[in-house]
Amino acid sequence: MHTHTHPHTHSLTLPFYFLFAISPWLILPRPHTDETTLWGLRIEALLCHMTDLLYTEKDLVTSLKNYITAEENKLKQVKQWAEKLDVLSAIAMQDPEGFLGNPVNAFKLMKRLNTEWGDLESLVLKDTKEGFISNLTLQRQHFPTDEDQTGAAKALLRLQDTYRLDTNTISTGDLPGVTHKSPMTVEDCFELGKIAYSEVDYYHTELWMEQALKQLDEGEESTVDKVTVLDYLSYAIYQQGDLGRALELTKRLLMLDPEHQRANGNLKYFEFQLINQRKAQAQEAQKAQEEGKERRKRLTSDASKKKKRFREPVPERKMYEMLCRGEGIKLTPRRQRRLFCRYFDNHGHPKYLLSPVKQEDEWDRPYIVRYHDIISHGEIEKVKELAKPRLRRATISNPITGVLETAPYRISKSAWLTAYEHPMIDQINQRIEDLTGLEMDTAEELQVANYGVGGQYEPHFDFGRKDEPDAFKELGTGNRIATWLFYMSDVAAGGATVFPDVGAAVWPKKGTAVFWYNLFPSGEGDYSTRHAACPVLVGNKWVSNKWIHERGQEFRRPCGLNETA
């Protein structure tokens, strides 16, 4: 039986044509003869060869002109590239964070530096320019890798799924909150599809190869041809079980390239498989029809006994994504009426008697409050300035060992700031203590986190559960009793903090902070505080948080007798 084959990965290079042909100079053997005859024959042979040399020279001149033309075309390509990048850089540098807040811009930056600058390097190397090449080679060590480009692509695909964005919306750059609109080319769409394909993600391969094909059908010029796109697309659709459509696309491919070896093989295989599939479906339909009569009898007799079925809970992942989109929030009007805004002085704290802070109830169970205008723009900038040089991939506490380590479900960069590093950090810590009434000496240091495009932290608990006895053993300060979270930036789209178990969503607002208890007064964990940071769709999310621990709170928050009180 024929075995289907899949497309190989194709590398894209900038077009460059270099023609340099030299006609052969043939030296023919001459018969032995006398001197006179020899001289005459030499002249004849020499003239003959010189004529060849004239043609050779003419060919060389033609080749030289072709070389010059090729060099001029190469220079023209480099010039166009430089002008395009100059304009793009000018726009980007007006607001670097805002520009990179657009996930398409972030992906295209990774793609340019990882792929296209390399192609440009190959182009320029044809006519070595010492200064540029040495500089480019030197700078290349700082360029993103294939892994970085793949990461940017995965972030874009993750955003597409979470926020239910169709490929055309992303490709045209019509993302919500975008200020730096950036359409995607056929090459961009193709590259996304190829990365999905390499990850055996045929669903996204189909979406992005279809988008590439759509743009090609609309007349967009590209170095990627329809045959290559159809090759990937038909195979991705076959892998998802749609044999009929895979066959249809393979036939379209063969109309463009009748000699395509892989497509010809796949055509026969798909046709064979489709015949078998239709036979199986016909048999199943007949069997279902026979069983259907008996089933209808049972349903009729059981109709009177039918009870209201228990409504199954929405899976956490689905609820998480719904909340990130602003859907599925479970706060009823009756519960909402019990939420208030107030001026808060923490029971007459001296600092806030004359200037109380603005406090707003965000949620009732668990009780989440937001403090408005609680951190100034100047403080935010200072915290970011201190944190930026040491931002590293954020870690989580291993529930088994208690050791901090990176995890694929937490995608952000973080840094820790201690109170003695700068007086402002000490002031911020003191402010948290004054407003919560909790001891800060046993709390963890202020953690600053930056969630770029696609940055997220999937559902998790801040406190250690009973099956994680060593979660914070190294700290020696007990469990995390409460969480204080500063929002240090506005986010154009996405980036909410959501609580899937209770259907709550808290949206970032610069200068505010939210606070909740992770433990009941009894010390038992409040499982309703399971929360997540939604991926940033557009923008750049800066937060800082303080995890407050049990030790030192014995008299500040006395233990309750009721387990969940």
Image: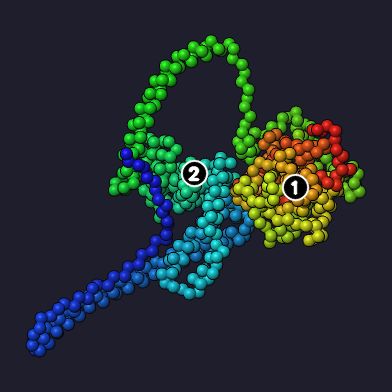
Q: Amino acid at mark 2?
A: Asp
The answer to whether any part of residue 493 appears in the image is no
Give the distance between the C-alpha atoms of the residues marked 2 and 1, in whole angstroms.
38 Å
Q: Nearer the viewer, residue 524 or 20?
A: 524
- Secondary structure of the residue carrying tag 2 is loop
Residue 482, percent from left and from top: 78, 43
Label 2 crowd (10 A; few <14 / some 14-19 / many >=20): some
| Label ID, residue 472 | 1
Q: Residue 201's mark?
A: 2
Drawn side of residue 124 relative to residue 502, left or right: left
User: Residue at position x 36%, y 42% from top?
Assistant: 4
Identity of the amino acid at label 1? Phe
> Is residue 273 left or right of 474 when viewed as pictured?
left
Answer few, some or many: residues within 10 Å of disc 1's Cα (few below 14, many 20 plus, some between 14 and 19): many
Going by the picture, which residue comes out furthest to the bottom?
35
Considering only vertical position in the picture, is 517 above or below 82?
A: above
Q: Nearer the viewer, mark 2 or mark 1?
A: 1
Residue ID at (51%, 68%): 137
For residue 364, side relative to residue 238 (left or right): right
Colouring: rainbow
Counting every numbered tag in the picture gives: 2
What x and y, as percent, mark residue 51?
19, 78
Near-viewer residue (326 or 543): 543
**Relative side of 371 to 32, left or right:** right
Seen in the picture, residue 461 relative to 380 is either above or below; the reply is above
Q: Which image quadrant: the C terminus? A: top right
Question: Residue 270: percent from the left, percent from the top?
Answer: 35, 38
| Residue in view at x 78 percent, y 61 percent | 421
